């Protein structure tokens, strides 16, 4: 199962200094310890939406989309690696930013090029270190809380732990094609082992993670908070020819997402036309789902 964005996205970053009053901000934020994290905030309004990207993914994925004319859209399979990805206003972050403030960040060792990259860290790293980085970034960038958090893929494990450990920061939750904490429950032993190994390997200098550590840390954490929430699953899946016998199946992924939705007292919605990187396939649909949760928070539900 893919953990993050697999298509290459060109970066166009503008450096500037953080400001508590400025709505739009793109650049590095000093989080202490000689480290900085790249942050992109757009729009105005409350609650702020904060996105936790997938493994190897970064902020620009939320400012890009698959070209409307790309022939991969007609495929029943998720062919994102063959897609033509375009930056532009018809993408998820600008759409949400038209109604409220939305911030997305780059974890270390995710964006392969461009200016103002987040400070590298040793890899693989723990989910707790990711939660700690998000807390440091929220504080350093002076982002108002509680927020509606959105998580994609591996980011779902980061958000799961953050919400359990710091429910006071969370007003709403959106899980887009998450790595569900329940995957080990539905997976066979060989599938779970392969998933854990695959997540720890990759190109030198790029992000790698520790799923087994993450699952265990989440299992030991307090319960999830009860706030407006939604879980979003993809319609498309990897072509059968690309799957190994020890990969999770689409049925298992959806079952794990159903279990996560039940733990959140919400529903798991299959979004038509989307593959794993839902924000690239159907940014309007994902933006609408985010705004549905934002509106529930505004209404006090």
Image (spheres, rainbow, N blue to C red):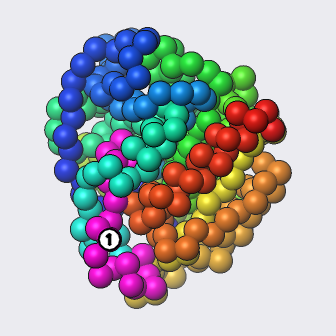
Query: Could you tell me which quadrant the C terminus lies in?
Result: top right
Image coordinates of residue 291 in percent, x first then y, are: 60, 46
Residue in the foreground of this view, choosing between 22 and 263: 22
Image coordinates of residue 221 in percent, x first then y, are: 74, 35
Residue under pointer 1: 68
Residue in the foreground of this view, choosing between 21 and 248: 21
Relative to 120, 271 lies left or right: right
Q: Is residue 239 above or below residue 159?
A: below
Q: Which residues are magenta?
A: 58-78
**Residue at the front extreme, as displayed:** 98
- Residue drawn at 25 percent across, 58 percent down: 86
Q: Secondary structure at mark 1?
A: loop
Residue in the foreground of this view, choosing between 287 and 276: 287
Q: Quadrant of residue 120?
A: top left
Residue 112 magenta: no
Residue in the foreground of this view, choosing between 87 and 158: 87
Relative to 150, 284 lies left or right: left
Q: Is residue 235 above or below residue 53?
A: below
Image coordinates of residue 203 in percent, x first then y, are: 26, 53
- Residue drawn at 39 percent across, 48 percent down: 62
Q: Quadrant of residue 25?
A: top left
């Amino acid at each position: 199962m893919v953990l993050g964005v697999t298509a290459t996205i060109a970066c166009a970053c503008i450096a500037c200094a953080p400001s508590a009053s400025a709505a739009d901000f793109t650049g590095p934020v000093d989080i202490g310890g000689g480290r900085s994290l790249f942050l992109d905030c757009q729009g105005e309004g409350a609650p702020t939406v904060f996105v936790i990207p997938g493994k190897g993914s970064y902020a620009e994925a939320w400012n890009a989309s698959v070209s409307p004319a790309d022939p991969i859209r007609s495929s029943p399979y998720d062919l994102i690696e063959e897609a033509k990805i375009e930056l532009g206003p018809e993408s998820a972050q600008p759409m949400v930013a038209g109604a409220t403030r939305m911030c997305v960040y780059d974890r270390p060792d995710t964006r392969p090029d461009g200016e103002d990259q987040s400070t590298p860290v040793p890899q693989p790293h723990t989910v707790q270190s990711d939660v700690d980085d998000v807390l440091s970034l929220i504080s350093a960038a002076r982002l108002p809380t509680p927020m509606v958090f959105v998580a994609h893929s591996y980011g779902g494990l980061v958000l799961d732990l953050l919400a359990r450990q710091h429910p006071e920061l969370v007003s709403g939750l959106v899980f887009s094609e998450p790595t569900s904490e329940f995957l080990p429950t539905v997976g066979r032993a060989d599938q779970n082992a392969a998933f854990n190994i695959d997540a720890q390997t990759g190109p030198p200098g790029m992000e790698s993670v520790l799923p087994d550590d993450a699952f265990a840390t989440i299992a030991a954490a307090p319960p999830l908070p009860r706030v407006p929430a939604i879980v979003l699953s993809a319609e498309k899946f990897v072509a059968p020819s690309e799957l190994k016998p020890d990969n999770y199946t689409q049925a298992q992924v959806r079952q794990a997402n159903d279990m996560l939705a039940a733990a959140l007292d919400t529903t798991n919605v299959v979004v038509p036309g989307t593959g794993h990187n839902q924000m690239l396939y159907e940014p309007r649909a994902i933006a609408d789902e985010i705004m549905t949760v934002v509106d529930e928070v505004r209404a006090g539900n």
